[in-house]
Amino acid sequence: MRLTYKYKLKPTKPQIATFQTWLELARRQYNFRLGQRFDWYEATRSRVDACPLVVSIQPVEEIYKDIPLTRTLTKGKRKGEVVSNIVEQGYVDWFSVQRADLKQTKTLFPEYKELDSQVLQNVIDRVEYAFSRFTKPDANGNRSGKPKFKGKHYYKSFTYTQLHNCDLTKDERGRDCINLKKIGLVPIVLHRPIPDGFEVKTGTVKQVTDGWEINLVLEDKDVPVTVAEIQPTEENSLGIDLGVENYVTLSTGETVEHPRFFRQSAHKLEKLQQRLAKRVKHSKPWKILKAKIAKLHQRIARQRLDWQFKLAYWLFSKCDVLFVEDLKLKNLTRRAKPKVSNEGEWLPNGQAAKSGLNKSMLDAAHGQFVQVLKFVAWKLGKVVREVDPRGTSQHCWNCFAQVAKQLSDRWHDCPCGASLHRDDNSAKLIKKIGLICSIAGMDYASLKTASELWFGGSPRCTA
């Protein structure tokens, strides 16, 4: 089992200067290595309409001129063995080539000798991860966008890939410290101890708005990763509807109000940004205001996350199985589609109202809340099951009949006699769908599947 614990660091001023120097060196190395891969990537590809696909734009000799075709291993059981840097179909094993080139980097740029070897090697790991997500599709056939070069404000962490429990110690003043190689003892706020049996594997030092923190990855191979298996019943399960008017509506009829943390701080944020716009960029007053704005955003994010954890624990105090919508938030927060008349004129499409709705949905952070629910469920030995959201706001929970509603229609009235708030109806329907599909042994619950199991056909009204 693996866990990640976050702790606050309280480094001295010389240690902060070292952290910042390391981040800058790591950022430069990241951009250089990413540039190497882009150069290779562009040199070995050509437009389909420019020349045959089997022909490169540049001669092969030019492409390989700075890349050694072989290398000699210097460590491990295979020490002294000569291996090829070219893999199948002529592609370069960039991960190994760039790892091996770090020795030459330290020779050309002596300042890189100040960095710990693990930290420097992790830069290549990050380049490999970013570029492989761009060039290789995942299990679903999707690829990530082209990696970007990191600016000074976008490279904020470095990683020790090998840490141990012995690195957590106390200094001569009795303060809890972590021993980081080539830096020394850094004071740490050890607000919770390392669990018995777990070992510290890696540590990532990260710069945040109000200082520095370290994320420790803990591992205990003797503890299995278990997933609770609980059979949902009417008594031990609960359905919830996520919304903007009410943050959560329970199938029992209870509601939780949307706290709107961002909306509450919007006025203060607006004033700070107006003052920032009047300052000379990169001047001292400008930097002070930038820090205030960043701290306000951090405060909002922490308020939201803390509240979501408390809400998750409260929900699981009421049930063992929680049914929640599998929302596609990226689709829900898209801009409204443009409207064009037959004469080619742009027509009003309601984007102003949609922008306000999008802001409220992003302020609610439902995607983050679902992840919090899953983590708390795993921690408590309980279960979260997702339900396909399609149709859950347009069908009746009692008879599955479709009752068409606009977004402004907040009440559900069905010919079968069900009359209640639309969010209450959705929460009850989500629970009913989840129970029907779970009893039938379905891995994924949806309205279509539940109606077929319930009626043996398509949704229809029994009134």
Image (cartoon, rainbow, N blue to C red):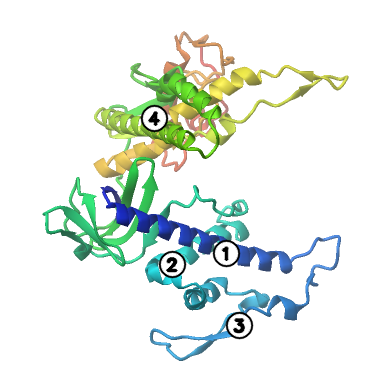
Which numbered marker is on residue 32?
A: 1
Which numbered marker is on residue 405?
A: none
Which residue is at a point 70% across and 27% down the rendered structure image? 337
User: Could one spot residue 89 in this view of the protein?
Assistant: yes
Please give the residue where the numbered disc 3 appears in the rendered image: 68
Please tell me how crowded label 1 is: few (under 14), some (14-19), or many (20+) other residues with Cα within 10 Å: some
Relative vertical location of residue 42 with respect to residue 392 in this rendering, above or below? below
Question: How far apart are the alpha carbons under marks 1 and 3?
Answer: 18 Å
Which residue is at a point 53% across and 73% down the rendered structure image? 98
Q: Point out residue 267 in the picture as x, y percentages from the top left corner.
A: 46, 19
Q: Point out residue 113 in the picture as x, y percentages from the top left corner.
A: 41, 72
Question: How far apart are the alpha carbons under marks 4 and 3?
Answer: 51 Å
Front residue of this view, candidates 152 and 439? 152
Among the two numbered marks 1 and 3 on one chain, the one whose residue lies closer to the N terminus: 1
Q: Point out residue 41 in the picture as x, y percentages from the top left corner.
A: 68, 65
Question: How far apart are the alpha carbons under marks 4 and 2?
Answer: 34 Å
SS of the residue at dot 1? helix
Q: Point out residue 271 in the picture as x, y percentages from the top left corner.
A: 48, 21
Among the two numbered marks 1 and 2 on one chain, the one whose residue lies closer to the N terminus: 1
Question: How far apart are the alpha carbons under marks 1 and 2?
Answer: 13 Å
Question: How far apart are the alpha carbons under marks 1 and 4?
Answer: 36 Å
Three-letter amino acid code of the residue under disc 3: Pro
Please give the residue where the numbered disc 4 appears in the rendered image: 300
Among the two numbered marks 4 and 2 on one chain, the one whose residue lies closer to the N terminus: 2
